[in-house]
């Protein structure tokens, strides 16, 4: 039955108009346009050297990242790695395949949001660095100090769907 429906739709679309009302054209579809990249200058992003673990895990995550995050449109990045992504201004920057955070200890407090365990570094007064520490590779989200947890909250399902969980 679905094949018949598809064929019927194709016949209607490809019909030259000889068997019916030839005045009908292509329907106009209105609505909100799909979000795209912001018209911002490329953001330089420092990244660690790409590791085999990053090459194995990060492509799936990068392919699944949204064009809009916490209301901010995606923006171009300038990086030595394909595993960096950014949104908005002030920027929200994600880097997949980062080193283990220097301050992470077995007793360090972690914050779990949407199934992802984050180590939060607030040592820089200008930014907050959220590092997901329970995946095959660490990934880092850096936001301005006045940004709440909305970006990491929104990224939780994407991370959960693309990177398997592991013990930190």
Image: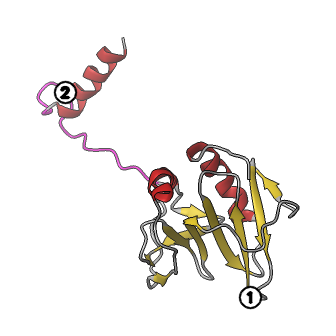
Vertical placement of residue 130 versus 20, above or below: below
Q: Which of 23 and 14 is in front in this view?
A: 14
x, y percent for residue 162: 56, 46
Which residue position holds label 1? 126
Vertical placement of residue 43 versus 136, above or below: below
Q: Which mark, residue 13?
A: none
Q: In this view, does 142 lie to the left or right of 1?
A: right
Q: In the image, which residues are magenta?
A: 16-30
The residue sitting at the top extreme is 1
Which residue position holds label 2? 20
Please tell me which residue is depicted at 64% across the width and 46% down the height of the picture: 160
Q: Is residue 25 left or right of residue 35?
A: left
Label 1 sits on a secondary structure element that is loop
Q: How crowded is mark 1: few (under 14 residues within 10 Å), some or many (20 or more)?
A: few
x, y percent for residue 36: 45, 66
Q: Which of 66 and 159 is in front in this view?
A: 159
Vertical placement of residue 13 versus 139, above or below: above
* Disc on the earlier residue, 2 or 1: 2
Label 2 sits on a secondary structure element that is loop
Find the distance from the CA under tag 2 to the CA under tag 1: 66 Å
Please tell me which residue is depicted at 66% across the width and 74% down the height of the picture: 142
């Amino acid at each position: 039955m679905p094949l018949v429906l598809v064929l019927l739709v194709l016949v209607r679309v490809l019909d030259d108009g000889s068997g019916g009302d030839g005045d009908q054209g292509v329907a106009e579809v209105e609505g909100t346009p799909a979000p795209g990249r912001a018209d911002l200058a490329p953001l330089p992003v420092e990244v660690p050297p790409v590791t085999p673990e990053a090459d194995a895990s990060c492509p799936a995550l990068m392919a699944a990242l949204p064009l809009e995050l916490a209301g901010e449109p995606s923006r171009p990045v300038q990086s030595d790695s394909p595993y960096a992504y950014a949104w908005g201004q002030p920027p929200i920057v994600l880097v997949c395949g980062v080193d283990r955070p220097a301050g992470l200890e077995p007793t360090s407090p972690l914050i779990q949001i949407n199934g992802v365990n984050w180590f939060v570094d607030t040592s820089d007064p200008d930014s907050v660095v959220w590092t997901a520490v329970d995946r095959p590779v660490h990934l880092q989200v850096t936001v301005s100090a006045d940004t709440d947890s909305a970006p990491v909250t929104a990224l939780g399902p994407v991370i959960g769907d693309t990177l398997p969980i592991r013990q930190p």
